[in-house]
Each structure stands twice: as structure tokens, then as C-alpha cells.
Image (spheres, grey):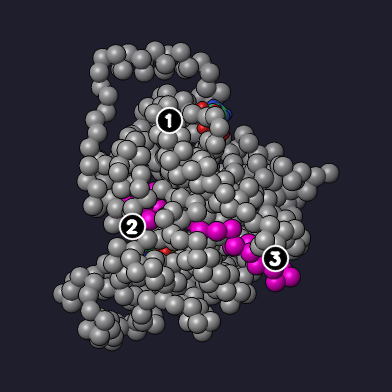
Amino acid sequence: MKKKILVANRGEIAIRLIRAIQELDYEAIAVYETPDRHSRHLRAADEAVWIGDGPRKDYLDVEKIIGTALRSGAVAIHPGYGFLAENPDLARACENAGLIFIGPPCDVIENLGSKVMARQIMAEAGIAMVPGTQNLSAGDKGLKEALTFADQYGYPIMLKATSGGGGRGIRRIENAAELQEQYPIARSEAKAAFNDDSVYLEKVVLKPRHVEVQILADKSGNTVHLGTRDCSIQRRNQKLVEIAPAFQIGHELQEEICQTAVKAAKAAGYFNAGTVEFLLDSDDKYYFMEVNTRLQVEHTVTEMITGIDIVRSQINLAMGQDLDFTQDDVKIRGHAIEMRINAEDPQNNFMPEGGKTISVYRSPGGYGVRLDGFCYQGFTIPEAYDSLLVKLTVFGWSWKETVDRLRRCLTNYVITGPKTTIPFYLNLVEDEDFQKGVFDTSYLETHEHLFHYQEDNSEVNKLARLIAEIHYRGENRYAK
Ligand code: ADP
Ligand code: ADP
Ligand code: MG
């Protein structure tokens, strides 16, 4: 009988994990909440277990996930990203239940889950970071500490939730009045979102690039990096487009950042796959930001330029194997760009388009093109979850080839029903700065013209969509 691995996630990443699990000759067990009952991840798995009505309740229920794994005879749990991926309780519960957690040890997750603790570990290891505070004290005392720090280092400053993630819990503060106003709000929002009201301050790096390094580490202490990624193109501190290797950064600086990431991983006692994030300023100075103790959405770009299957590696490492390659074996070639195709309206502040049904879905393919998705024609996007529909990852030998290929794919992509980020990306690939590789985290704010496009509402286009809808209606296997 094949061994089984439970996938404690949904959407595109569940399918990504299931593929690696099945390739390694394990069986994949999917779990789902009611709003996901028509999701393709259930069909991709060998077995699917309903865990409750949710939404976002049962996917987060450690006891339920562990119970389901034990009842279905799983030997391991892969948490993917989001949900329980950075919850040390799941890692700990796995340990207690005799299950393998596919990720780092629980104490590493716990230490690095606190941005303040992570900064402390890295400071002790001599890694550079922007000035910041410890966790601010409760109440007025904390506000006083914050005002003192801001006086010393000057505005703007970043007010950050210590346990924050996914771009949430970060506020840029411009002056003392704003700090006084935002401080209590930040605390209560952090409490509500992360069940921890701790906040701290960091000096702002002006117009930085977000550069991160993918790490793989085995239990025997071998730690390798898989090069850099640039994730500067963001909205609301959340990534939209990711590039590997980070473009327009000299070889020496790349190498130095990667070595620093390896040092950071070693300082934290890291094991399995992880990402060390840095901010790079215009003087080529780089500062440690945080470690994500899990698989990242954008791992696909690294897979494209290294040829290494990161999820396969994660599973093998968790099962106790050592890395079967060294740093010298890691060869980075070409360029890869990932665009997150979200059901969102870029022209309306990237408002999610959940609840809508995909009426026509036609995806591109061909050389150097990879799609990681979970939607299909006739699929109604559940409102309860994030708006990522599919990741378009493109490889090319040169930057120009990669951008050309991306433009071709975006032009060929047809998704109707919800609004998506595709027309915005079509403008992006035409943008001169993007084509030259000149961007930082303020890119969207400084490139207003990216938002200028019109839906094609011509009669011909409407008719074409209607014909496509009628034509494909019969083919949807999962209609209600
Ligand atoms: P999260 O856990 O939500 O990913 P991060 O600490 O990684 O939070 O920060 C997310 C993003 O916020 C960064 O990629 C960057 O764009 C911005 N950011 C965070 N800290 C700073 C800072 N000190 N200066 C400038 N930008 C920052
Ligand atoms: P991938 O399947 O490689 O992850 P996509 O999500 O873009 O990439 O799917 C590829 C194509 O196959 C899409 O056009 C999608 O609609 C279609 N497809 C795949 N599986 C199903 C399914 N179970 N039901 C309906 N359409 C499907
Ligand atoms: Mg981050």
C-alpha cells in the first residue's frame, strides 16, 4: 500500500503539492471546506475529506487537520502557504501525533514567526538590518517609546505587527500626530488578525527593492541557496509580480546577499525550505527583513531558473533525506517572471471579484510557460478565500525573451466573468521602466498609466464571448 500525505491547503497550491506527492509515489489526501466543494484540488487528490462548513475556520483547525490525517492513515502533512503553514502549533501537534510535518521544526517557526525575535537572532549573527524597536510596551508607555524612537530616527517610520504576514499589519507613519492616532488602531487590528497585539517600529527604507533568497537545508546541516528573487512589484505591501534572479543586480552583490541568507538560515537552526527577505536600497545596501518559514507562492520562478523541484525537495528533506546536491551543483540560468492572475479589479483598488463565475477560460501554453491554477470554465470563485486564480510563470534565456513571451501569453489568456489583473499586466509588459528592469516597491504609485485600459465591450467581443459560453457549457464536469 502506498503511503499517504495530507495536504492542509486549497486552491492552486494544493494542486501543486498533490502533483509532487503523486510523483514521489505517495497518495495525496485533500481536505476541503464546503465553499470549496467544486474546487479542482479535490479531483486532483487520491482522496478528499470534507472537514466542515468553514469558511477559513476548518482549514485553520489544528485538531481537525491532525484528526483527519490520523484517521486517513497519512504519515505526513504539507501545510502549503498561508493558513497553518506558519503556525507552530500544527508542527508541534504533528510531532506529538507521530506525523511528519513538511516544514521546519516548531521552535524555528515560533522564533522566526515573531519579526522582533527574528531581528534579534539575526542581529546576534551580525546581519545588517534597519534600526527598529523591541516590542512596544502596552498602553501609553508603548506610545511614548514609539514617539521617542521616531524623534531619534525621523519620519517616516513603519509600524508593524510583530506576528504579521501577507502584507497585513504594516503601516507607514508620516508624523507624530499620525503615530498617536494609528498606534492604538494598529494594536487592536493586530490582535484581531494575528491573535497578538504586539507591534514594533522600523525605520523606513525609501524606494527599496524587495529581494529574497530561497533556501534549502537538510538535517545534517547542509544549507544551500537557490538564488534571489525580486518581488518589488507590490500592491498594499503584497507581491503581484516576482522575478528570478533579481534583475539588474550585479553578480557580486547577488552572491553576497545569498551568502547572508545562508548565514541567517544557519543562525536560526533552519531546516527544510525557507525564504530570507531583504530590502535593498538605492545605494546597494541591503537589510534583513524577515524569514518566511514555508513554501512561497513565487517558488515557481526559482524552479524555472534552477531546474530544482522545491516541493519534491521539501518532502524528501522532511522524510529524512539529505540534500543530494551541493551549492556548486546549483546552476542559475535565464530569467523567470511570475504574474499572479488574481480575480481582482486593478482599476478599483484591486477589489476582489469573488462570487463571480468564470464564463470563458482559455489558457496559453508552449515553450517556457508554466501555469499553476485551479479554476476552470463554469467555476464560481468562492468569496471566502484569496483571489489568486492562476500563476503564470514564464522562462526565457534573456530578459527580453522572457518579457516577449509573457506578453504573448497575456495576449492569449482569456478569462471572462470576473475582472482579473491581466489587462493591468498587459500594460506592465509594455512599460519602459519594467522592460529596463527599473522598479522598486513604489512602482505602482509612480506608474499611474498602468491602470489606463478599457474593457473590450464591443458588440463583436460580446457575441464572441456568448458563443464561447454556449459552446463550452456542456463540457463543465463540475456544474451544480
Ligand atoms: P509580511 O510579513 O507581510 O510579508 P514584511 O515585513 O515582509 O511583511 O514586509 C512586506 C513589505 O512591506 C515589503 O516587501 C516592503 O515592500 C514593505 N516594507 C516592510 N518593511 C519596510 C521598511 N522598513 N521600509 C520600507 N518598506 C518596508
Ligand atoms: P493546469 O491545469 O496546468 O494547472 P490551468 O489551471 O490553466 O493549468 O488548466 C489548464 C486548462 O485545463 C484550463 O483551460 C482549465 O480550464 C482546464 N481544466 C483542467 N482541469 C479541469 C477540470 N477538472 N474541469 C474543467 N476544466 C479543467
Ligand atoms: Mg514578507
Q: Nearer the viewer, residue 312 or 307?
A: 307
Q: Based on the picture, tell me whether residue 226 belongs to the magenta stretch.
A: yes
Quarter of the figure that contains the N terminus: top right
Does the rendering let one see residue 365?
yes
Residue 440: give its label: 2
Residue at the location (24% across, 33% down)? 453
What residue is shown with label 3? 218
**Quarter occupied by residue 467:** top left
Amino acid beneath label 1: Arg
Q: Is residue 161 left or right of residue 346?
A: right
Do labels 2 and 1 touch, CB within 8 Å? no
Mark 2 / mark 1, whichever is N-terminal: 1
Which residue is disc 1 drawn over?
A: 408
Q: Quadrant of ligand 1?
A: bottom left
Residue 459 position within the rendered picture, expressed as x and y whole percent measured from the top left: 26, 14
Residue that appears at 75% across and 58% down? 324
Of the residues tagged 1 and 3, which is closer to the observer?
A: 1
Numbered range of the magenta stretch? 215-240
Alpha carbon separation for disc pair 1 and 3: 39 Å
The amino acid beneath tag 3 is Asp
> Which secondary structure dominates the residues rendered in magenta?
strand
Answer whether residue 409 is magenta in the image: no
Residue 441 got which mark?
Answer: none
